[in-house]
Every structure is written in structure tokens, then in C-alpha cells.
Amino acid sequence: MSNRNSIATAALPVPKPRAARAGGPPLWQGLLLCGGIAVAATSLGGSGWLQRHGVGALTIAIVIGMATGNTVYRRAPGLAMRCGAGVDYSKQALLRMGVILYGFRLTLQDVGTFGISGAVIDAAVLVSTFVFATFAGTRWLGLDRRAAMLIATGSSICGAAAIMAAESVVRARAEQVTVAVATVVVFGTLSIFLYPALFQLNAHWRFLAQGEGAFGTYVGSTVHEVAQVVATARSIGPSAADAAIIAKMVRVMMLAPFLIGLSLWLRLDRSGPIAQVGSRVQVRRGPLAIPWFAFGFVAAVLVNSLQFMGSGVHQFTLTVDNFLLAMAMAALGLSTHIAAIRQAGARPLLLALLTFFWLVFAGAAINRLVPDVIAGIF
């Protein structure tokens, strides 16, 4: 079999759901439902109280989606059947479009101002957190590897957006994605209250370099969601907020190479199913899921780095991106059964707690050691 036939891509454009192609329910009903939830979530996400507590439109969209999905959506006669095609399309195509447009938040100039030390800190936190969480989840807690990887991804990079992007690579179930997003919300929100206290303690302990800027880098390299980073760092000071946002954006920029590396790792992993072939035992390797939308993400970063887009066009692009991601989160909520989350039990939450401790303590150690190592090399 040729390589071409052995590669399963998670690419754009995503084919229309089978029901829509076969003369079943059209897409527009499900898209309208997801869009309505996204409008409500965006409006609520603009409230001052929620912004101060790092609760954004994506979080609100999945909550509304779950509430609707486990009540009206499932109980109203024929509603799920009529809307299913559009909901599936939102979870697939619109999600990938949203991830691509997410790249317009970043520029190569951000990396340049951040410096080598900051980029190495982000990379070290990302890799170490993902490896720790995946190992702890599968070996210590006995979680399904897909569930552990999703929690690891959300904690390592950029919360819900990273979880949604990795979903197609690890081929997780909807309830696993929802549980992973929930853990990001819980412990990312806890960070908003914990890190300002750590900043005050650091003034006495002097574990990290003094000043808002260094602590802002620590915040940006270890807190889960972009909104949570902003809320946390702003409570410390403007210099901390500037450093934290740049650190977080560089961390988000690592999403594309991370997804490609994850896909290759899953392809080459020797822990998969085995098969007897004559007198030999071989490992069955699954198809390589190439996340082509990750390349679109990189292309968006490169285009944005040229800075030829007008401010109005750029802001409109970001607004569209927020809305597409909110629709995808709404679709995920609509597709999630509360019973499946209950069945997952306390182990995912325990894994998220262990990973949170790793981010706080190991992340602090990385932020302390890396600048000294870089300075010694250069």
C-alpha cells in the first residue's frame, strides 16, 4: 500500500456530514443553533466580572452547549436529528478554520522581543508538562491515553483551543474533550487567585528573578488559557501583563509543531495493537493523521508578521475567529452526555491537579534555571 493511501488527514476542507450529502437534514439548522449559542456566549463573555475572573466566551459556549444538549436538544422530538449535520460540521470544519485564524494573533516579532531564553522556557514547560501528564495519567492513574493526552495538551499550551485542535490527532471522544476542557477551566481559574499570592511570596523568597517582567514570563509560560493569563498578570501589574501576554503568545505559536510532532509520535509508537504475521509479531501502526490546519496556522502567523493588514480588518478577523471557536465549543457541548462525564470519575480531575502542581513548581524551576543556563552558553 502506498504512503498516500496510508495517510489519513485531519485537513480542511472537511467533507460535509453524510446526512447532508445524502439528502438528509441540511447544515443550516445545526449551524444556526451553534451560532445562537456562540452569540450568547460572546455577549456574556464581554461582561466585566467574567473577564476579571478569566472566564471567556469559549468556556461559556461549552457550558451553554452542554446545558442545552442534555435537556432541550435531546428531548425535543427530532431536534437532534435535524441539527446533527450542522453540529458535526461546526465541530470539524469550523474548528479548524478557527485554529487557522488564531494565528493572526501572533507575529514573528513577538518571538524576537521575547528572546531565546523566553522561547526555551516556553518549550521546556510545554514538553515537560505534556510528558509528565501523559505518563502520570496512563501509568499512575490508569486513564485512557487519549484522555490523558488531551488534559496534557490543554495544560501545556493554550487550554481549550489546544484541546480542540488536538482532538482530531488523538481521535478522542466528545466526552473526553469536554472533561479535558473542564479541568483547564477549573485549574486555570485557580491560577488567577494563586499567582498574585506567589508574586508576593517571591518578593521574600527570591526564587524567581525580581520584578514584574520576570514573574510575567512565569505566568505566561505556566497558566492555561490566554484569558486566564491576562486576568492573572493584570492583577500583578502592567509590566507583568506585557511579559505574560508575549510569553503566552509564543507558547501558543508552538501549537503547530506540537501537533505535527504528536501525530508522528502516535504513528511510530510501538505500544499499539500487535498482530501475528507468519512467525513474526508486528505492531500495527495507525494511519498518520497530518493536521494540515496546523500549517494554515503557521501561514496566518507569517502573514500577520508582515503587518500589511489594516487594524480594522485585523480586528474583524479576530472577531470571526472568536465566533468560529465559540461555535465549535457549542457543538462540542451539544454532543456531550453528562452521564459519560460522570462515568469518567475523579481520575481526570486528579490528573489535572497533579499537572497543575507541576506547572506551578516545575515551571518555576524552569523559569529560574533556563536564563542562567542561556547566559552561561552565550
Image: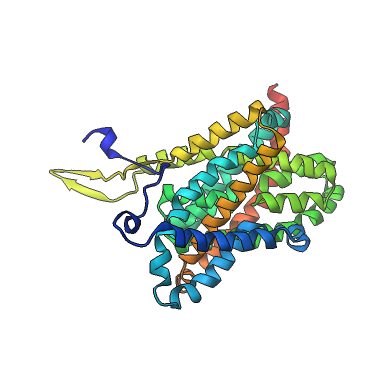
x%, y% of residue 72? 50, 75
Residue at 40 percent across and 66 percent down: it is 82
Task: Work out which residue is located at the far right of the displayed protein and give it.
Answer: 204
Task: Work out which residue is located at the far top of the displayed protein and give it.
Answer: 378
Residue at 51 percent across and 44 percent down: it is 97
Residue at 58 percent across and 66 percent down: it is 63
Foreground pick, 188 / 128: 188
Foreground pick, 326 / 63: 326
Task: Work out which residue is located at the far left of the displayed protein and give it.
Answer: 278
Residue at 76 percent across and 39 percent down: it is 243
x%, y% of residue 52? 77, 58
Q: Is residue 147 left or right of residue 16?
A: right
x%, y% of residue 87? 45, 60
Residue 367 higher or lower than 95, as above or below: above
Q: Quadrant of the N terminus?
A: top left
Q: Quadrant of the C terminus?
A: top right
Residue 154 higher or lower than 301, as above or below: below
Q: Is residue 336 left or right of residue 62?
A: left
Residue 155 higher or lower than 290, as above or below: below
Quarter where residue 139 is shown = bottom left
**Is residue 143 visible in this depiction of the protein?**
no
Q: How is the image coloured?
A: rainbow
Foreground pick, 312 / 15: 312
